[in-house]
Image (cartoon, rainbow, N blue to C red):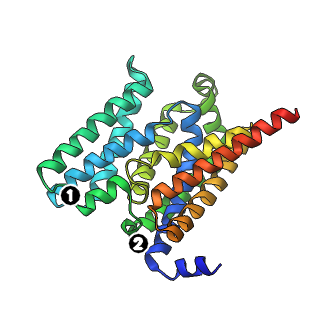
Amino acid sequence: MNLIREMLSYPFLVRALAGGMMVSLCASLLGVSLVLRRYSMIGDGLSHVSFGALSIALAMGWSPLRISIPVVVLAAFFLLRITENSRIKSDAAIALISASALALGIIVTSLTTGMTTDVSSYMFGSILAMSREDVWLSVVLSLVVLGLFVICYNRIFAVTFDENFAKATGVNVGRYNIIIAVLTAVTIVLGMRMMGAMLISSLVIFPCLSSMRVFKSFGGVMVSSGILSLACFFAGMVASYQFSIPAGASVVVVNLCAFLLFMAWQSLGRLRG
């Protein structure tokens, strides 16, 4: 308890905890739908797009957040259109956009500012990068995501598992796909400042995969993913502070440990059965 009180005495850590937990919650809820639809690597792809946009923004002296959010939203929309209207599969489209954006960001960085502290923090994450504006955006985003899943649960369930059935029942599948893509894009941009472009996709993937080891219903996986994401992020931040290790990497390792525990629980259940 003394350690936690000590952490909360630093304003930048309070911002990091508040903003990071909200982003983790959003990423985990959105991740359930994305993983089940085999879009699990979209977080990785969009984070690389965001890095490319941030590199250009920093080189031009523009506001990184105001540039990267619309660019990543457009990339998510473009990615959605590619997978729906062409023969390119979702994983190939994500890899195509991801590699291109990352390469562009590296070239722009090398030709202009070089690997400065700002660029490095977006690449690998930094707990100092979370501002008050980011925290408020994270709170608003989490409220929007929670509201969407509570109000439109049945429709999201239908779109996730069977788009043809959803269309037959009158659900506007295209609209829900766009909404989820936009919310995912904003979540990735905000989470990148904490986790970095290299690790942000873990917030989308790990909680869902861990929960799916134990829970079999869509609702059970959703609730478990949300709770697990909050617990793992908080534990990762505490470990980061205690052992002076990077916050993003610490959160990922805690998520990995949780995944292994859930796998062990699943295996134990099978042996008992």
How far, Cα to Cα, is label 1 from label 2? 20 Å
Residue 220, quarter of the rendered image: top right
On the picture, is 191 further left or further right than 272? left
Where the N terminus falls, by quadrant?
bottom right
Residue 151 vs 209, above or below: the answer is below
What's the amino acid at mark 1? Leu
Residue 254 in the image, given as x and y percentages of width and height: 58, 54
Residue 43 in the image, given as x and y percentages of width and height: 44, 42
Residue 49 in the image, given as x and y percentages of width and height: 32, 43
Residue 176 is tagged as none
What's the amino acid at mark 2? Arg
Q: Nearer the viewer, residue 78 or 131?
A: 131
Q: The residue tagged with tag 2: helix, strand or loop? A: helix
Is residue 151 something one can see in this rendering?
Answer: no
Residue 203 in the image, given as x and y percentages of width and height: 52, 49
Q: The residue tagged with tag 1: helix, strand or loop? A: helix
Residue position for label 2: 132
Q: Nearer the viewer, residue 203 or 176?
A: 203
**1 vs 2, front mark:** 1
Task: Identify the residue at image location x=50%, y=70%.
Answer: 241
Cβ atoms under marks 1 and 2 closer than 8 Å? no
On the picture, is 3 further left or further right than 72? right
Indicate which disc, 1 or 2, sits on the residue closer to the N terminus. 1
Other residues around mark 2 within 10 Å, as few (<14) / some (14–19) / many (≥20)? some
Task: Identify the residue at image location x=15%, y=49%.
Answer: 110
Residue 128 vs 41, above or below: the answer is below
Residue 58 is tagged as 1
Is residue 204 something one can see in this rendering?
Answer: yes
